[in-house]
């Protein structure tokens, strides 16, 4: 979730190295992936869709009770798949969430002081979100809920630092890495500093998203990897640190190198236009989640907001969850819901809290005890309503240098939303969203001080026009420990889609390990469908659109590395030396 525009920088500085792994000639190396309706699709027939599967023949078994804990992208995609044709006859699905509205952090439950709606940050929809795009098509909404593509900017207190174009429109679709390097515009960082990042291509070539690659790269921080590869201090601080702070929500010294490489490849390196992003034309909860929930309720899914899962009852053997104690925050009543299957669709910090609160049930299993290591990093989301209209260069922007170890993005909601002031609001000034990540140091401030800081930061970026405007209304949304933290070593603490200790427990969300290759909202969506498939006894990948194969030159480089490791490992690649073995 909350992915923001600072990542293409890591591609541009690797372009020369990408060229170095190209063979002299190979058919198709310079061809672009097919694009359908502005979205990338893998060059293979689409997978069978869970959204339109035919109903099964014969008598259906007695419906099983499935309880989904959490109603973010992972929980809702699981409920959607379980309630699809051919599946809903065999299960009864209930979704509980502690928040007052379904949607997890994406719901629009927040309000400004004046009662206007606000959100827990802005949420982008990148070109590789193939499964989410297919969902939006299947919902057949009256109007497209997403904006078109637009250029994005990056800022520091010195001014504009870089501009990222719409890559699918910037020129011919070139092999990934080359197009980004040609079309991305840097304002201040010179070629000599950029060149110091070239050795990172070796890490991208070795990191192929396999379990072995995760083990090799997860134990070291991304900052340590960059230092050991000789990346210059300026390049790291002006390119890579902002990328990690706004992509993984923590400083590079506190983020796994494996997570950083995987995130950057998905959002930037898969194809030239992978970083092209669209935004919701209103609050996501209203534009997307509300009609989606209405569709699922029509299929028999029950939603129980304001309901917290607090306790778990196991069978005598301790191998299955047979009941979940849930507390209704509105009535204060606690009930135990009988269950046949349970899906944990919550973030890492919430999952860790559940384990610590249930030592005699979840805590008795080593698999669950390791989840207690999971933790989250904090987000501060703000939205200010100004009394004047301000002309902003770009509607979506990332920043660095305003607060140490804090990521920052800002958005012109006036440009992104159809009705930025909400229905019936007479306001005519600009509406600006400013979000901060790894924001514990800011959460300690009171609301007035936060709004003052936000306005001062925007004054630096936007100049006299913003300085002349006054704040009429504002929202401050604090989210302590709310987003997943991919700390070094976190991979071994994260759950798989299906539990090994409890045979009827499953997991969904972007904290879950999966080989699909996606990240953020798309990963949460995919793991939700994978969990549903396992509950229904299907192939875990059924109905999921894959990311497709690596582009030819990327595959070539990874195959070369794999071949060398096989040789030096005597037929056992895991015994071969890694890039780390040659670093100082």
Image: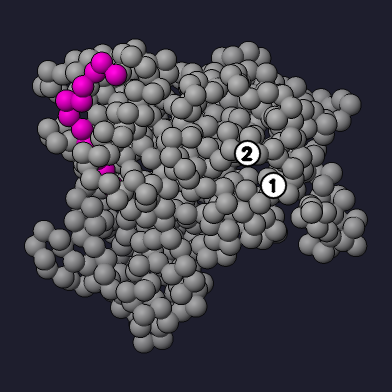
**Residue in front for this viewpoint, 522 or 579:** 579
Relative to 110, 550 lies left or right: right
Give the image quarter of residue 239: top right
Query: What residue lies at 51% left-to-right and 62% top-to-bottom?
Result: 494
* Residue 227, numbered label: 1
Q: Report the Cα–Cα distance between label 1 and label 2.
A: 9 Å
Q: Which quadrant, please, contains the N terminus?
A: top left
Query: What residue lies at 61% left-to-right and 54% top-to-bottom?
Result: 221
Count the marks: how many? 2
**Residue in front for this viewpoint, 43 or 430:** 430
Q: Residue furthest bottom?
A: 316
Magenta extent: 467-478
| Most common secondary structure along the magenta stretch | strand
Residue 534 seen: no
Q: Which residue is mark 2?
A: 236
Q: Which quadrant, please, contains the C terminus?
A: bottom right
Please determine whether, in this image, residue 176 is positioned above or below residue 208.
above
Query: In the image, residue 227 lies at what x, y percent?
Result: 69, 47
Secondary structure of residue under mark 2: helix
Please determine whether, in this image, residue 403 is positioned above or below residue 351.
above
Do the CB atoms of the residues marked 1 and 2 lie less than 8 Å apart?
A: yes
Secondary structure of residue under mark 1: helix
Q: Would residue 538 be counted in the magenta stretch?
A: no
Query: What residue lies at 38% left-to-right and 64% top-to-bottom?
Result: 351
| Mark 1 or mark 2, earlier in chain | 1
């Amino acid at each position: 979730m909350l992915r923001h525009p600072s990542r293409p920088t890591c591609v541009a500085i690797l372009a020369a190295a990408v060229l170095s792994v190209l063979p002299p000639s190979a058919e198709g190396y310079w061809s672009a992936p097919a694009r359908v309706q502005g979205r990338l699709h893998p060059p293979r027939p689409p997978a069978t869709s869970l959204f339109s599967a035919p109903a099964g023949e014969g008598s259906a078994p007695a419906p099983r009770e499935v309880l989904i804990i959490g109603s973010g992208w992972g929980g809702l995609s699981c409920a959607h798949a379980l309630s699809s044709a051919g599946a809903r006859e065999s299960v009864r699905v209930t979704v509980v969430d502690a928040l007052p509205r379904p949607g997890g952090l994406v719901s629009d439950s927040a309000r400004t002081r004046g009662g206007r709606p606000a959100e827990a940050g802005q949420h982008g929809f990148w070109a590789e979100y193939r499964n989410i795009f297919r969902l939006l098509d299947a919902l057949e909404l009256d109007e497209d809920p997403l904006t078109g593509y637009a250029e994005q900017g990056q800022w520091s207190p010195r001014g504009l630092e870089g501009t990222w174009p719409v890559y699918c429109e910037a020129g011919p679709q070139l092999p990934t890495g080359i197009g980004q390097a040609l079309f991305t515009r840097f304002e201040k960082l010179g070629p000599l500093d950029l060149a110091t990042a070239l050795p990172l291509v070796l890490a991208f070539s070795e990191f192929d998203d396999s379990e072995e690659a995760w083990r090799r790269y997860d134990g070291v921080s991304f900052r340590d990897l960059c230092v050991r590869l000789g990346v210059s201090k300026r390049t790291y601080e002006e390119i890579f640190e902002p990328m990690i702070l706004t992509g993984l929500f923590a400083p590079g010294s506190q983020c796994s190198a494996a997570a950083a490489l995987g995130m950057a490849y998905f959002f930037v390196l898969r194809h030239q236009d992978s970083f092209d992003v669209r935004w919701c034309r209103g609050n996501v909860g209203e534009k997307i989640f509300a009609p989606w929930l209405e569709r699922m309720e029509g299929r028999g899914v029950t939603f129980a907001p304001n309901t917290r899962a607090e306790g778990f009852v196991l069978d005598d053997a301790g191998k299955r969850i047979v009941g979940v104690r849930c507390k209704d925050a509105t009535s204060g009543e606690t009930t135990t819901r009988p269950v046949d299957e349970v899906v944990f669709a919550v973030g890492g910090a919430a999952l860790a809290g559940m384990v610590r609160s249930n030592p005699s049930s979840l805590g008795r299993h080593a698999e669950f005890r390791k989840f207690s290591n999971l933790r989250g990093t904090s987000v501060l989301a703000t939205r200010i309503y100004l009394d004047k209209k301000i002309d902003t260069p770009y509607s979506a922007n990332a920043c660095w240098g305003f607060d140490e170890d804090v990521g920052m993005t800002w958005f012109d909601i006036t440009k992104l939303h159809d009705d930025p002031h909400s229905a019936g609001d007479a306001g005519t000034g600009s509406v600006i969203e400013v979000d901060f990540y790894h924001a514990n140091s800011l959460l300690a401030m009171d609301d007035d001080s936060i709004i003052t800081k936000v306005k001062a930061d925007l004054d630096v970026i936007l100049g006299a026009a913003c300085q002349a405007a006054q704040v009429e209304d504002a929202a401050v949304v604090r989210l302590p420990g709310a987003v997943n933290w991919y700390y070094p070593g976190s991979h071994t603490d994260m759950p798989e889609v299906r539990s090994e200790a409890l045979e009827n427990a499953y997991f969904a969300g972007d904290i879950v390990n999966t080989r699909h290759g996606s990240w953020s909202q798309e990963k949460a969506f995919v793991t939700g469908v994978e969990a549903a498939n396992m509950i229904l006894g299907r192939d875990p990948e059924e109905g999921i659109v894959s990311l497709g194969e690596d582009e030819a030159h990327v595959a070539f480089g990874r195959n070369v590395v794999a071949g060398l490791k096989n040789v030096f490992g005597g037929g056992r690649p895991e015994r071969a030396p890694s890039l780390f073995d040659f670093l100082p």
